[in-house]
Amino acid sequence: MPMDYLSRRRIAVPKHISIMAFDNGLESLRRGMSTYSFNNHALARSRLLRFLPIGILSSTVWQKHS
């Protein structure tokens, strides 16, 4: 963990440096870190909407997850 590395070098978090996790994992939450969770479904859907004809994505599969 980055916090362990910084702690061994006596670099205070968040006093001297700020860090953030991008996995929304339990270890990050346990340590009180800010995390970011990617919404993979929305990201994939937005990419598909950009490149595929509109009619293809109007199935009930996509509507259920919107």
Image: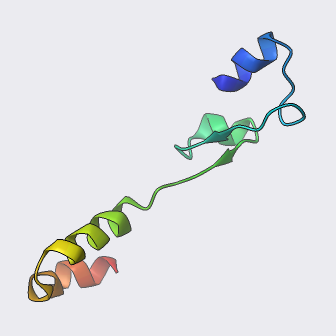
**Could you say which quadrant of the image residue 22 lies in?**
top right
User: What residue sits 70% from the left and 16% below the top?
Assistant: 5
If the image is split into quadrants, where does the C terminus sit? bottom left
User: What residue sits 26% from the left and 68% below the top?
Assistant: 47
Could you tell me residue 15's position as x and y percent? Answer: 90, 34
Could you tell me residue 17's position as x and y percent? Answer: 80, 33
Q: How is the image coloured?
A: rainbow
User: In the image as oriented, which residue stretches furthest toward the top?
Assistant: 8
Depth order, front residue of 56/51: 51
Note whether 56 is above or below 20 in the view shown: below
Note whether 32 is above or below 36 in the view shown: above
If the image is split into quadrants, where does the N terminus sit? top right
Position of residue 17 in the picture relative to residue 47 (left or right): right
Depth order, front residue of 42/29: 42
Could you tell me residue 49's position as x and y percent? Answer: 22, 77
Position of residue 20 in the picture relative to residue 46 (left or right): right
Depth order, front residue of 25/40: 40
Note whether 1 is above or below 48 in the view shown: above
Note whether 15 is above or below 5 in the view shown: below
Could you tell me residue 8's position as x and y percent? Answer: 78, 10
